[in-house]
Image: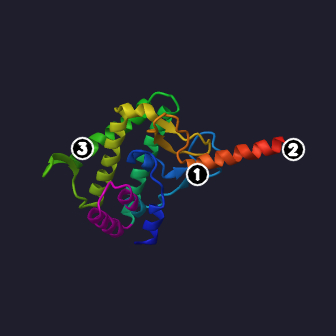
Amino acid sequence: MSIGQLKINAIRLIGGVSVLDFLNTCDGRRPGTSLVAVVDKLSNLEEIVHWFLHAGLIGEDEHARCVDLVQQSSWHSLTAFKQLIDFRESLYRLFLAIASGNPATAGELDALNEVLVSTASQRVLVSTPVGVVWAWRPCDTLDGMTAGFMGRIAVQAATLLTSPDLAKLKLCALPDCDWLFVDTSKNGRRRWCQMNVCGAKEKARRSYKSNVGWR
């Protein structure tokens, strides 16, 4: 396993659905954050390929084929990388608005609809021992890989948008955290993307303010 893959495997998957985990691969975009810089955990196309394996959206064989395609594509991978990141940011704006109590914007929905249409040919019905299921065409070209990746994320985004689970969509309660998640807790009161990270930071902040107040 490469160093790059180990780095990507360290990214936590806490969104409850892979599309949210994909949106959670960047920090510092949230309006009003005190973070001074945007930090993207995905810095090139090969890292996106590693992330798709990490998230279980592709298997080991397809991962190996995709890595080969990226390594053979040279500078062409920059265009594919930009397409995927631009789509991620469009979806982030869409779901951030919804999690903040605002309606989905027509512009971001149009962008999602365009991807759903343009990548529809990558999705096929196949027969399996348990019945007919949806599957994605094997990645044979860099363009096909990019379309397949965008299609997977677009379908998940559309599924969440039309699911009752959308009412459980939340933004981490820590103001400096960008992360989104579906709250599947029994009481529906989950506030933090990760209690042992953001929850702990908030607890430490409150403790500090309390101690200062007693001085």
For this rendering, which residue is in front, 107 or 62?
A: 62
Q: Position of residue 29 (x, y in %)?
A: 56, 45
Q: Please give the label number shown on residue 197.
A: 1
| Picture quadrant where residue 210 is located | top right
**Count of numbered circles in the view:** 3
Is there a contact, CB below 8 Å, between mark 3 and mark 1? no
- Mark nearer the N terminus (2 vs 1): 1
Q: Secondary structure at mark 3?
A: helix
- Mark nearer the N terminus (3 vs 2): 3
The residue pinned by badge 2 equals: 215
Q: Residues within 10 Å of mark 3 (few under 14, many from 20)?
A: some
Between marks 3 and 1 in the image, the one whose residue lies nearer the viewer: 1
Does residue 144 appear left or right of residue 101 in this picture?
left
- For image coordinates 42% across by 66% down, the residue present is 5
| Picture quadrant where residue 141 is located | bottom left
- Mark nearer the N terminus (3 vs 1): 3
Does residue 148 appear left or right of residue 125 in this picture?
right
Q: Position of residue 85 (x, y in %)?
A: 44, 51
| Picture quadrant where residue 144 is located | bottom left
79 over 183 or under it: above or below? below
Q: Position of residue 12 (x, y in %)?
A: 48, 55
Inter-mark Cα distance, 2 to 1: 28 Å
62 over 180 or under it: above or below? below
Q: Secondary structure at mark 1?
A: helix
Considering the whole magenta stretch, tell me its main secondary structure.
Answer: helix
Specify the amino acid type for callout 2. Answer: Arg
- For image coordinates 31% across by 48% down, the residue present is 152
**Which segment did they paint magenta?**
50-74
Q: Please give the label number shown on residue 120.
A: 3
Inter-mark Cα distance, 3 to 2: 63 Å
For this rendering, which residue is in front, 140 or 212?
A: 212
Residue extending furthest toward the right: 215
